[in-house]
Amino acid sequence: DALAFQVGETTQIHTGGILQATPHAVQGCSGGSGRSSGSGGSAASASAKKGRSGGGISRETFAVFMEPEYHGDMDIPGGRTVDDTQKREAEVHLPRTVRVLRSRWKEGMNFGEFSDATFAAFH
């Protein structure tokens, strides 16, 4: 049994980069089952579809988002810089489809403005 937490970009900003957002991208499923594995299909489910061992494995996800008030400040802590918050060396771990944080968040934005910029970048 396990319980995992992913730290998001809001926490990355609020900590001035001390905590980094978990690099990830949500993908739809592929294949004809109509069920999503939450990660674009797993090797186990792909093997099971082809009749190989590994069937009966699933990944279930229940996302709970905790976020600041819509007009809440997205300031970094004193003593930290924008460069601390958005380290370029960390960006190499992002999936290709993810727009880097520095392209969506600017110092002085509130959470609503950051959310709007993020949605616009992906949709």
Image (cartoon, rainbow, N blue to C red):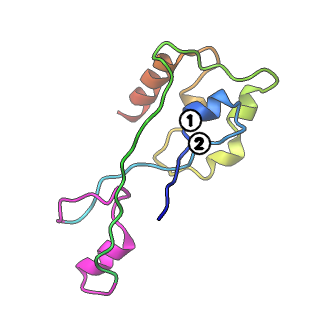
Q: Name the amino acid, label 2.
A: Ala
Neighbor class of circle 2 (other Cα within 10 Å; few <14, some 14-19, many 20+) is some
Q: Quadrant of residue 118?
A: top left
On residue 9, the disc is: 1
Looking at the picture, how far across and down is residue 5, in whole percent?
Answer: 53, 48
Residue ranking furthest to the right? 79
**Residue at image point 51% right, 22% down:** 68
**Which residue position is annotated with label 2?**
21
Residue ranking furthest to the front? 1
Q: Is the Cβ of the residue at disc 1 closer than 8 Å to that at disc 2?
A: yes
Looking at the picture, how far across and down is residue 38, in whole percent?
Answer: 35, 55
Q: Quadrant of the C terminus?
A: top left
Main secondary structure along the magenta-highlighted residues: loop
Q: Is residue 46 above or below residue 65?
A: below
Q: Quadrant of residue 34?
A: bottom left
| Secondary element at tag 2 | loop
Q: Is residue 33 above or below residue 97?
A: below
Residue 108 magenta-highlighted: no
Depth check: give the residue in front, 32 or 37. Answer: 37
Depth check: give the residue in front, 29 or 103. Answer: 29
**Residue at image point 30% right, 73% down:** 45
